[in-house]
Amino acid sequence: MAEEEVNYASVVFKTKKNPRSEVQKEEEETVYDEVKVRNEAPEQTADTSQFLPDKKADNNSCCCKVVVCSLVSLCVVLVIAIVLIYQNENLKRNVDNLTVKVGNLTRTYAVAESKIANLTAEKQNLTTRNQELETEKNNLTEQIKDLEMKNAVSVTQAQKLIDAYCPKENEGRQCKACETGWGVFQSSCYAYNNAEPSKQRTWEEAREDCKGKISDLVTVADEKEKNHVSGLSVPSQGLTEYWIGLRAEGGKWKWFDGTNLADSLWKQTPVDGHCAVSDQKEGWKSVSCGERKRWICEKAALSL
């Protein structure tokens, strides 16, 4: 199609003499300029339509950029989410591992605490046992000392007994059934202690004196021995009573060794706390064990 030439006539506006506003003047000038431009370059005006596709392309490009930016942002968000999920899983696994380790450490601590308690108890037992052993050691040491002392005393006493029973005579020894100061009857030796009133003793004290002489208070086995003991109860200074080894216990008369008195020897109602004395004239009598009397000792005679 051949290009057509378009000629636009010049337009001259005539107005009334009424004054126009500045805005109307600007609008008229603008219209005039547009008409002038079209008259001078009609071809350029006809070709402006070719620039419309470029504006669409720009719009499409902007849309693509927005889409790309959105996708990139989405990818970034997804990557961040994946990283966070991964880290969360790692944290969860770490927490689980730490929980297991804490459980193991707790059990180990409980076992260790139990062992410490057992060791503490064993230590206490060992300490107690050590104290017991120390006490036993001290007791044994004391016993050894006592035995040594007793052994020394026994040796001394044995020597005294030898000297008493077998005194030296003309660089030799002549042994007797009883030591000096003791009288013999049957298989026993007897010694009466006619102590003056200030030196008399209770029944228990009299026994202690006899024990110091390796003897004890006299016991009587039969009527013959009873008569012999009565003959030893020598009156002196108006005193006639001598302790013998008989006392009342549990409603019975018993000798100091626990044997019961034969009824044939003496019939006397026993009174607990009373002991027997021998009187040369009146025979045996029951008196309080706490009274002070003379006493008679007895021990076995030496077999020759």
Image (tube, helix red, strand yellow):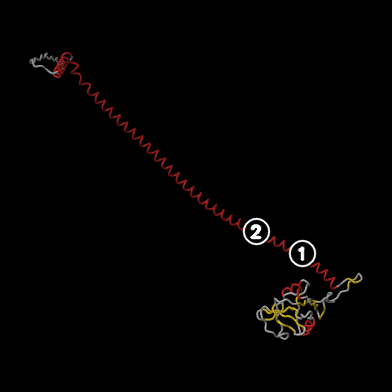
Which of marks 2 and 1 precedes in the sequence? 2
**Percent of width and height locating residue 189:** 81, 77
**How far is the residue under mark 1 from the one under mark 2?**
27 Å
Q: Which residue is disc 1 drawn over?
A: 149
Could you tell me which quadrant the C terminus lies in? bottom right
**Percent of width and height locating residue 141:** 72, 61
Amino acid under disc 1:
Met
Q: Find residue 224 and name its label.
A: none
Query: What element does badge 2 sit on?
Result: helix
Q: Residue at x 69, y 84 (%)?
A: 268
Q: Residue at x 23, y 21 (%)?
A: 51
Q: Is residue 169 visible?
A: yes
Query: Looking at this view, is 274 or 125 the one in front?
Result: 274
Q: Is residue 50 left or right of residue 164?
A: left
Q: Which residue is disc 2 drawn over?
A: 131
Vertical order, 10 against 300 (above or below): above
Vertical order, 257 against 78 (above or below): below
Vertical order, 190 against 37 (above or below): below
Query: What element does badge 1 sit on?
Result: helix
User: Label 2 near label 1: C-beta < 8 Å?
Assistant: no
From this viewpoint, which residue is outermost toward the left? Answer: 16
Query: Looking at this view, is 31 or 52 the one in front?
Result: 31
Amino acid under disc 2:
Gln
Q: Residue at x 48, y 48 (%)?
A: 102
- Residue 7: name its quadrant: top left
Query: Looking at this view, is 57 or 248 the one in front?
Result: 248
- Residue 222: name its quadrant: bottom right
**Percent of width and height locating residue 39:** 15, 14
Crowding near the residue tagged with mark 1, few <14, some 14–19, many ≥20 C-alpha atoms within 10 Å: few
From this viewpoint, which residue is outermost toward the right? Answer: 170
Crowding near the residue tagged with mark 2, few <14, some 14–19, many ≥20 C-alpha atoms within 10 Å: few
Q: Residue at x 34, y 33 (%)?
A: 73
